[in-house]
Amino acid sequence: MNVYQDPYMNFADMGPEEMGFLQQATRELSDEQKNYFYRVYSSKRKNTNEILIFTLLGFVGFAGIQRFFLGQIGMGVLYFFTGGLCLVGTIVDLVKNKSLTLEYNKNMAYESHRMAAMSQPNS
C-alpha cells in the first residue's frame, strides 16, 4: 500500500476535523504535489500529546514552554515572566491544548499547501 494513498494513517492523534481540513486542502493537488505536501506537513506538524506535556511543565517551573514550542514567542515570554499569567493561562492552555495544536497544525497545512502548490510536478 502506498503511504501517500492513505497518509492519515501516519498521524496517530489526528482528529476528524484535521483530517477533513487536509483532505480539502489537497483536493486540487497533483499526486506529486500531494506527496510533497505530506512530506512537508509531517515535518512541521505538532502532536497534541507533546503540547499537553509541555503545558504540564508550566506547573513545575517553566511556564510558557508550550507557547515557545508552538512558535508563539511573545506569548511564551509573557507566560514565562508572569508565571503562566499566575497559572491561569497555563490552566486555560491545559484545557485548550487540542485546539491550540489544531490551530498550529492548520497554519502549517496552509504553509505546506502553498509550498506544494508552487512546486512543479516532474512530468
Image: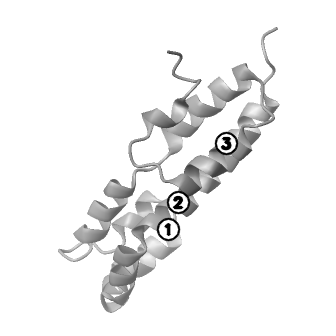
Query: Split into 4 quadrants, where in the image is the C terminus?
Result: top right
Q: Give the image location of residue 16, x and y in percent.
A: 53, 53
Residue 114 vs 66, above or below: the answer is: above
Disc 3 and disc 2: Cα gap in Å?
A: 15 Å
* Label annotation for residue 23: 3
> How many neighbours does mark 1 have within 10 angstroms: few (below 14), some (14-19), or many (20 or more)?
few
Scheme of colours in the image: one colour
The secondary element bearing badge 3 is classed as helix
> How many neighbours does mark 3 have within 10 angstroms: few (below 14), some (14-19), or many (20 or more)?
few
The secondary element bearing badge 1 is classed as helix
The secondary element bearing badge 2 is classed as helix
Residue 18 vs 4, above or below: the answer is: below
| Camera-nearest label, 3 or 2 | 3
Residue 4 vs 42, above or below: the answer is: above
| Residue located beneath label 1 in the image | 99
| Residue located beneath label 2 in the image | 102
